[in-house]
Image (tube, coloured by chain):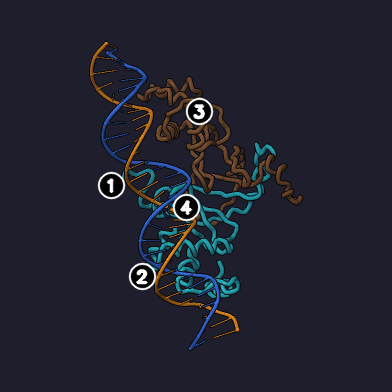
Chain colours: A cyan, B brown, C orange, D blue
Amino acid sequence: MRSPAELTTAFRERGLKLTPQRQLLFRLLDGNAVHPSAEALYVKASELMPGISLRTIYHTLHDLAAMGEIQMVSVGSGPARFDPNIDDHHHVVCVECGDVHDVYVNNIADLRVDGLDGFQPDSARLVFSGTCQRCAISNPPYKEQST
Amino acid sequence: MRSPAELTTAFRERGLKLTPQRQLLFRLLDGNAVHPSAEALYVKASELMPGISLRTIYHTLHDLAAMGEIQMVSVGSGPARFDPNIDDHHHVVCVECGDVHDVYVNNIADLRVDGLDGFQPDSARLVFSGTCQRCAISNPPYKEQST
DNA sequence: ACGCTATTTGCATGAGTTGGTAACTAGCAA
DNA sequence: TTGCTAGTTACCAACTCATGCAAATAGCGT
């Protein structure tokens, strides 16, 4: 995603207005690496701008996605997550806490894919599941839990 | 997934009963490579057993998944798909018609993954998007559509 | 055949998201 | 500053996909 300042210009060029609500969303998403859901952004936004509506959050996220500024990420279950990182990257999801991190895989093209049967793939989504460092520490796999 | 006959035994061993509804589901899933949704299975099942409830479909699919006989597949949008193929494999989705095919990728372990940041991945789901052969023929990419 | 218990089913509910309308607000160009 | 127009909000409805609940039903071991 471009910077809030650049988005200001980009929105105006598209004939879209620069409302405080949108500017707030720009700021909340700028450099945000936690892959928030619409609801999570709504909670954050409400703290800073009481009265902002969830409808507006969805609307602005949709606009940003349509402009290619953010990416909608489905991680299998739960609400959609939004990612301002639009680099060619993939995701790893913590099975304990549900956190999503960006990962970079540079040799996907080297994969040997069998069974395509005439299928022409043109993109790939790769989602790793595992345990994040924090959860690995608080839930050591080979140690009994202290209840 | 094991054969319907073997599932009969497996269910009984678990103290689960062998109802006609479940047997029907076994048959509908046996060798099924189209990755049906619960709803799609419900439609098929209703033709053969009018009155069967969608609730039962969900319940049985859940049981089969819990026993490791089938796999639930999320393809990003739309309902979950169910796959009786429990080999280590991945999927390719047609962006035109939504069909899902199984593909086999044998060198996933060779992927170079950056940015893990302490994350310990233990599995990977890979979903390719592209165009299936049928849709490629009916919608040729470099040819104008006849409206 | 009996009876315990799993199962089925309809109905209701839930999460997540989108849609419609209407009234009020506010950006921004002239 | 004015005015056109887009945006926000509230309220509500709808929608998809999935699950919880309770009463009725039916396996299946005995």
* Amino acid type for the residue under numbered disc 3: Glu
Question: What residue do we see at 50% from left, 68% from top?
Answer: A30
Q: How many neighbours does mark 2 have within 10 angstroms: few (below 14), some (14-19), or many (20 or more)?
A: few
Q: Earlier in the sequence, mark 1 or mark 2?
A: 2
Give residue B6's position: percent from left, percent from top. 47, 21
Residue A146 is marked as 1
Residue topped by disc 4: B119
The answer to whether the residues at label 4 and label 1 have Cβ atoms under 8 Å apart is: no
Q: CA distance from mark 3 to mark 4?
A: 48 Å
Q: CA distance from mark 1 to mark 2?
A: 41 Å
| Residues at discs 3 and 2 in contact (Cβ within 8 Å) | no
Using a 10 Å C-alpha cutoff, classify the residue at mark 4 as few (fewer than 14 neighbours), some (14 to 19) or many (20 or more): many
| Tag 2 near tag 4, CB within 8 Å | no
Q: Amino acid at mark 4?
A: Phe
Expressed as whole percent of the image width and height from the top left, the position of residue A76 reads 48, 47
User: Alpha-carbon distance for marks 2 and 4?
Assistant: 36 Å
Amino acid residing under circle 1: Ser
Q: Secondary structure at mark 4?
A: loop
Residue B23 drawn at (x, y percent) = 45, 23
Whether marks 3 and 4 lie on the same chain = yes
3D distance between C-alphas at marks 4 and 1: 23 Å
In the picture, the quarter occupied by the N terminus of chain A is bottom right
| Closer to us: B144 or B19 | B144
Q: Are marks 1 and 2 in contact (CB under 8 Å)?
A: no
**Residue to which mark 3 is pinned:** B47
Hey, what amino acid is under mark 2? Pro
State the mark number for residue A50: 2
